Image (cartoon, rainbow, N blue to C red):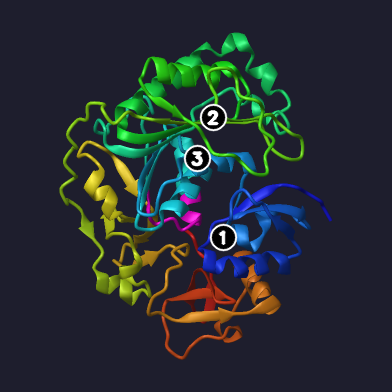
Amino acid sequence: MITSRRSFRLTCAPADEPAVEAMLRAQGYAFEPDPFFAPARRLTAEPAPLGTSLAAFFGLIYIQDRASMLPPLALNPEPGAAVLDMCASPGSKTGQLAGMVGAQGLVLGNEPSPSRLATLRRNLMVGGLTGTATCCYPGETLPLADASWDRIQLDPPCSGWGTVERHPRVRDIWKEDKLAPLIRLQRALLAEAQRLLRPGGTLVYSTCTTNEEENEAQVRFARDELGLLPETLPVLPGFALEAPRRGCEGVWRLEPRPGDTQGFFVARLRKPEASAAASRAAAVPPRYETVPDACLLAEGVDPALLPGPVGIFNGSLHILPRPGLALFPAGLRWQGLYVGKIARNGDLHLSPRLRLDGPGPVAELEGRNGLDTLEALIQGRSVTAADLPLPATGGKHILLRWNGLNLGRAALKNKRLLWAER
């Protein structure tokens, strides 16, 4: 038995949290609430790596340092809001923001690195975050309209000095004499964020470093050179904050605490209401083929539960969130959440990660026996339809539920159930 104080957060709807916690406990994990954020939990017992748990596999939890959960809390977008995450991969903050704005909101996650973009998209897909979209551009030159976003999250590349517990050599790799390019990039990203913010809009700037040149000095740059107004963040329960540096009060500065929290810095800034605002760019005209609602219903998915139509792009299926269709300019190359593909014979192959309710058949699994079935399924072992409590009506896909919790969609082939993501 491994004892751990690692942090994670529940990514499900609040009504589903008891079922997710029951799933974790049934596999031997013990944890306690972390009072600073309702979905946050801290492990007290870890019989196997948490990333191998069923809850992690089905995207119901996200393993994340508790300090890394702070920037979205500082931004605090309301349900239905549109948020830009300028440097998004691996997606911890993007996913947290998506949970806060809900399926009727929008989070656009930009990631300049194509390889890291793939990680971002994978994590959003596993989490079933239908109100998200992604793009791949240098963060300092985004093809987005001036003054078009009310909420922006900027967590730029940094020296990472606050991660010394996980990366003991980080101070040797990123010595002070090597930081000038990083500092220039951070300032360019701040300037781009200032351009994109609407008057009265909010920017959260955060890093996982303890270096003042990348933290307080950048806040002063944003204030003095870009005209952004620092705002005082509220008292933060459950964290030991360092005393603020002179002239930079109201931020959250955390020193690394082994076994507890990595070093982190969070500042919130506002664009003055009097700032000049450019006209909003026109939305992209509809030039895409979409999956008919009847086809989605035939596959057991209720299209009314999706935040937009499902577009078809070279045989790949992606949700097109309506807020994005109304906001994104014509020149932006972006992608909604992947939800499946069209086979050569024209059949829809929806992703097993699409766990929304619908008219199709459901396997209602319960208790320890249900978990054993799920473990066998995701490990590729044989699970026959006769072993499951299936309704009499047939179907090519079965929605899996455990104790009332939607998990995903298994394929039914030759009376055997398969979990197939390819």
Residues under labels 1 and 3: Cα distance?
A: 23 Å
> Under tag 1, what secondary structure?
loop
Residues under labels 3 and 2: Cα distance?
A: 11 Å
Does the magenta run of residues contain 62?
no
Residue 60 tag number:
1
**Residue mark closest to the camera, 2 vs 1:** 2
Residue 250 tag number:
2
Q: Is residue 378 above or below residue 266?
A: below
Q: Position of residue 131 (x, y in %)?
A: 37, 54
Which region of the structure is painted magenta?
Answer: 123-132
Q: Image point 55% across, 68% down: which residue?
A: 16
Residue sitting nearer the eye, 41 or 170: 41
Q: Is residue 316 visible?
A: yes
Q: Position of residue 305 (x, y in %)?
A: 35, 67
**Residue mark closest to the camera, 3 vs 2:** 2
Q: How many badges with numbers are in the image? A: 3
Q: Is residue 362 above or below residue 262?
A: below
Amino acid residing under circle 3: Ala
Residue sitting nearer the eye, 370 or 267: 267
Q: Position of residue 146 (x, y in %)?
A: 25, 30
Amino acid residing under circle 1: Leu
> Under tag 2, what secondary structure?
loop
2 or 1: tag closer to the N-terminus: 1
> Under tag 3, what secondary structure?
helix
Q: Image point 40% across, 79% down: which residue?
A: 360
Which residue is disc 3 drawn over? 74
1 or 3: tag closer to the N-terminus: 1
**Quadrant holding the N terminus:** bottom right
Q: Image point 40% across, 50% down: which residue?
A: 78
Q: Are marks 1 and 3 in contact (CB under 8 Å)?
A: no
